[in-house]
Amino acid sequence: MSGSVYGTMFKIATWGESHGAGIGVVIDGCPAGLLLDEQVVQDFLNRRKPGQTMYSSPRKEDDKVSILSGVFEGRTTGTPISLVVFNENQRSGDYTQIASCYRPGHADYTFDQKYGFRDYRGGGRSSARETIGRVAAGAVASAILRELGIKVHAYTKSIGPITIDSQNADIANTSLSPLSMPDLEASKKAEEYLFDQMKDHNSVGGVIECIVTGMPAGIGEPVFDKLDASLAKAIMSIGAIKGIEIGDGFHAATVTGADNNDPFIYDTDLGLRKTSNHAGGILGGISDGADIILRAAVKPTPSIFRPQNTVNKDNENVEIRIQGRHDPIVVPRAVVVVESMVAITLVDQLFMGMTSQIGRIRDFYSR
C-alpha cells in the first residue's frame, strides 16, 4: 500500500491498523532543539481517544503514547521521531459476521476491489483509529508553530441542523462542551438532537471550523502546491471528510467581485492589511497575513445499529445489522484531527518557504 506518507520537508509516515498490535507515526524533518516529551503528544491524543462521553465509541483505550526515537533529554535531536500507541481493547469478534459483507458507507467494497483482500476487523487502515498517527504528528507540528507565534484552533461549528451563534461563541468553551462547540447554548441543542437520533439507532454529521492566527504572508507555492490546495488535500485525506471550503467558500459563488474582494489599506501601526477576509487568508495559493479560515464537512457515522441492505462477496443480496462499538457522531473527536493536519501542512509549507528568496539563504549562511 502506497499513500501513507505526507509532506515534503516536514514528512510523516503513519502505520498500523485498528485491530492490529498498535498504531504509530514516523516524523522526518523535525528540527533539533524543540522541547518535546510524551505529555505534549498525550495531551493531543487525549482529545481524540474514545470512551470519554456518551457520544463517542465506548471502546476503552488509554491511547498512551511512547516516543521510541528522535528525542533526548526532552529535546528533539533532528533525527526521525517515532511514536507508537499500542492497541489494548480490541474486540475483533464483533466483525466476524460482516467479514463477507460490504457495509454501506464503508470502504469494504473498494478495498476488496483494489487489493482483492481486506482487514475486516474495524476497517483496518480505513478505520478512524488510523488518525492516532496524524494527531501524534500534529502535536509535534503544533509545538513548532508555537515557536513561531502561530496558533491553530479547531472546533465544531455545526451538528446536523444546529449551528453555533458567533455572538455566543467563546473558544474557551470548546473544552467544556462534549461536542467541542464554543457556543454552549448551541451545544445543548445539538446534544438533544443527537440523543434523539441515537434513540432511533441513527448517526449525525457536522461541520468543523479551523482558524489559524499569526500566519505570516508569503507562505505557499503558487502552482500545484498552493497553500489552500495542500490544506484541501490534507483535510480530505481524513476518512470522514466529504467537503472543504476556505474563507467564504461556496458562498463566494453567489456574490459579485465587488462584494468578494478584500480591500487593502496601509496602517502606520499595523502595516499593510486587508479590511475584510473573504479569501480566508490565502490569495493565489499564498498566505496573505490574515487569519486562515477553513471548514470541513463531516459525514454521519456509517455504522448505524439498524438493519441495512447490502451485498456479500458471492453477490447475494443480504441484510446486516452492524455490531461493535461505534461513535454516533465522529465530529467532536475529529476536531483535533483537522487541527493536526492543518498544523502539519503549515509546518511543511513554512519550511519550503525558507528557500523562496536568495536573500534568506544568504542571511542564514552568512551568520
Image: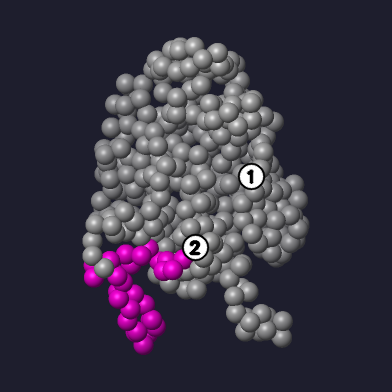
In the rendered image, the quadrant that contains the N terminus is top right
Residue 339 seen in render? no
User: CB atoms at circles 2 and 1 under 8 Å apart?
Assistant: no
Disc 1 marks which residue?
A: 4
Q: CA distance from mark 2 to mark 1?
A: 20 Å
161, above or below 306, in the image: below
Q: Amino acid at mark 2?
A: Leu
Label 2 vs 1, first from the N-terminus: 1
Q: Is residue 266 magenta?
A: yes
x 59%, y 41%: residue:
132
Foreground: 76 or 124?
A: 124
212, above or below 159, in the image: below
Image location (x, y in percent) of residue 163: 28, 45
Q: Is residue 134 magenta?
A: no
Helix, strand, or loop for circle 2? helix
Crowd band around label 2 with a 10 angstrom C-alpha radius: few (<14), some (14–19), many (20+): many
Compared across the picture, whether 314 is left or right of 11 comes to left
In the rendered image, the quadrant that contains the C terminus is bottom right
x 41%, y 69%: residue:
283
Q: Amino acid at mark 1?
A: Ser
Helix, strand, or loop for circle 1? loop
x 47%, y 73%: residue:
217
Disc 2 marks which residue?
A: 227
Image location (x, y in percent) of residue 204: 36, 33
253, above or below 44, in the image: below
Which stretch appears magenta?
A: 258-285
Residue 138 seen in render? yes
